[in-house]
Amino acid sequence: VSAEFERLLPELVKAGVDFILIGGVAGIVHGSARVTYDVDLVYSRAAENIRRLASALGPHSPYLRDAPPALPFSWDEKTIRDDLNFTLTTTLGDIDLFGEISGGSNYNDLLSHSFEVEAFGIHFRCVDLPTLIRIKEAAGRVKDLEAVAELRALFEERER
Amino acid sequence: MKVARIEDYMRDIDRSLLRENLKLTPAQRLEKFVKFRDFTSELRRAGENARQRSVPGKTHRP
């Protein structure tokens, strides 16, 4: 399901969820011309934030992506507390939530490498371009080679 | 067999697309993508309908 991030991000912001946009949509913020179908977010593991995250996504039928139907999955504070990263499908599209990313960085680590974006009538934080490149490189996936190449080219173009 | 490196991929990047995007604000880039995504969704739906119409006995979705 293609993510409706223009609806998803405002839902999270209105609920007061602390998150930083990473991944392909962050690439678009920086000028990437690549198509992406999910939203990748690093969220704060603070107890209050976990509560807000559970509450904000709850009405949108979050379920584990690619999991067999009717698994005993419940999207609540305990589920989020007991695990770290989630690849979810929701009625607002697919969303990947990371408590920690490759290399061990979390929300607090990334905060100083992020900036505020205003779009869709809201403000939210997005990871900066050098850090986005570093994250993609750290993931070390073959499928990311093209994405890293484009982000590096973007960085060069921006610095010209 | 030669192993592809990031530098190899960089040679094939269409920088004209990137330069156009860099003229926009972050919000405008996101809005541009939403329009493009909606456009591709419509094409995908039209393609599904066309395939269903080509199969006897199947009805197409509005």
Image: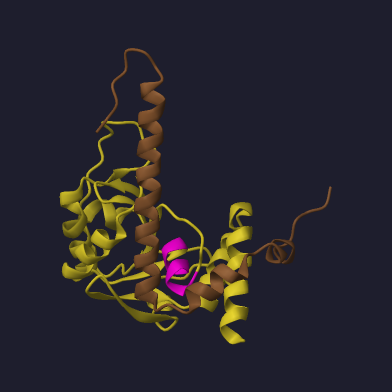
In the figure, the shade used to draw chain B is brown
Q: Is A147 on the left-hand or right-hand side of A115?
A: right
Residue stretch rendered in magenta on the structure: A24-31
Rendering coords of residue B14 (x, y %)? 62, 65
**Rendered residue at 38%/82% (across/down):** A115
State which quadrant residue B4 falls in. Answer: bottom right
In the figure, the shade used to draw chain A is yellow
* Residue A85 makes an appearance in the image: no
Q: Residue furthest top?
A: B57
Rendering coords of residue A74 (x, y %)? 22, 44
**Rendered residue at 34%/76% (across/down):** A125
**Rendered residue at 36%/73% (across/down):** B28
Secondary structure of the magenta portion, mostly? helix
Q: Is A6 on the left-hand or right-hand side of A52?
A: right
**Is residue A33 a member of the stretch shown in magenta?**
no
Rendering coords of residue A91 (x, y %)? 24, 46
Which residue is at the front of the view, A127 or A150?
A: A150
A11 up-or-down from A153: above or below: above
